[in-house]
Image (spheres, rainbow, N blue to C red):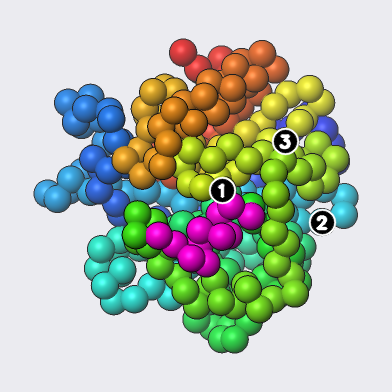
Amino acid sequence: MRIETKNPDIRITTVSAGDYYTDAGAAMGVLPKAIWKKYLQTDENDTIKMALNCLLIQNKNCNILVDTGVGNLLSDKQFKIYRPGHFSLLENLNELGISRHDIHHVVFTHLHFDHIGGILHKDFPNELTFPNAYHHIQKKDWLMATNPNELNQAAYPFREHINVLSDSIRLDIIDGDTELFPNIHLQLVQGHSEGMQIVKIMDQGRAIYYAGDMIPSFLHLSPSVTSAYELCRKTSYMAKIKILKEVKETQGLIIMNHDPQKGCINFDELR
């Protein structure tokens, strides 16, 4: 889905990497089932389909991909649990005229399995899916992913992915807020994970946020609604307050990475 921008030098497109299933109660967290059941289609196990909406940002000089989906290297156990659909990221990039060699930067909001999985591909053994790209991740999340504690082990299961990244000369570990390019900002917010970062694009005064798992779907737009996976609900709450305030003030929008029906929401739809 193409996101209309005011700046002709920046092009923004959501690119699907497929989908997977997860427990509805865990995804909705503190939101009561009596509420989310009205809006979500669940199966007999109360699991819901989650979209994997990655973000492609293009300027005059490069192609930037934000997050990569679950990929196609899940174990049999993981495949049974998450039931991922076809990993379609490369195909959908190709439809936009972009090959895996044309991606110059990969930004990870964080290194949970459904965001890092696509950096390796079964058809390209022993190399990164995007071999020419620098891979940008916050230091706090990298430290957790490389040495997860008991609370976080299940969220960082892709040891091979981490090892390949660790050996790559194209790994860029950043520490705090960073302006990747003019008008393209990476902001450390934490809350959902130790090193959760979000992407803010300034489009001639309008703030466009790819908030990752801070606001993964329209049901998470309320600041108080967080998933059961949050490490610190208070931190996530404060970050969401700031995002929503700026989107309203600048007449911007929020791109939602896991919402299967709605890829983004404009300022005038926020309540």
User: Which amino acid, mark 3?
Assistant: Ile
Q: Mark 3 points at which residue?
A: 201
Residue 216 figure quarter? top left
Q: How far apart are marks 3 and 2 (CA)?
A: 15 Å
Look at the image and say whether residue 230 sits in the magenta stretch. no
**How many neighbours does mark 2 have within 10 angstroms: few (below 14), some (14-19), or many (20 or more)?**
few
Residue 195's tag is: 1
User: Which amino acid, mark 1?
Assistant: Gly
Which residues lie in the magenta part? 139-149
**How many neighbours does mark 1 have within 10 angstroms: few (below 14), some (14-19), or many (20 or more)?**
many
Earlier-in-chain disc, 3 versus 1: 1
Residue at 64% across / 65% down in the picture? 94
Residue 162 figure quarter? bottom right
Q: Which of marks 2 and 1 is in front?
A: 1
Check if mark 3's residue and mark 1's residue have beta carbons within 8 Å: no
Examine the rendered structure and indicate whether residue 47 appears above or below residue 38: below
Task: Name the main secondary structure of what is drawn in magenta.
Answer: helix
Q: Looking at the rendering, in which quadrant would you find the N terminus? A: top right
Look at the image and say whether residue 144 sits in the magenta stretch. yes
Residue 62's tag is: 2
| x then y, percent, for residue 149 | 40, 60
Is residue 149 shown to the viewer in this render? yes
| x then y, percent, for residue 193 | 48, 46
Examine the rendered structure and indicate whether residue 234 appears above or below residue 96: above
Residue at 27% across / 28% down in the picture? 31
| Kind of element beneath mark 1 | loop
Residue that extends furthest to the bottom in the rendered view of this protein: 126
Earlier-in-chain disc, 2 versus 1: 2
| x then y, percent, for residue 10 | 80, 41
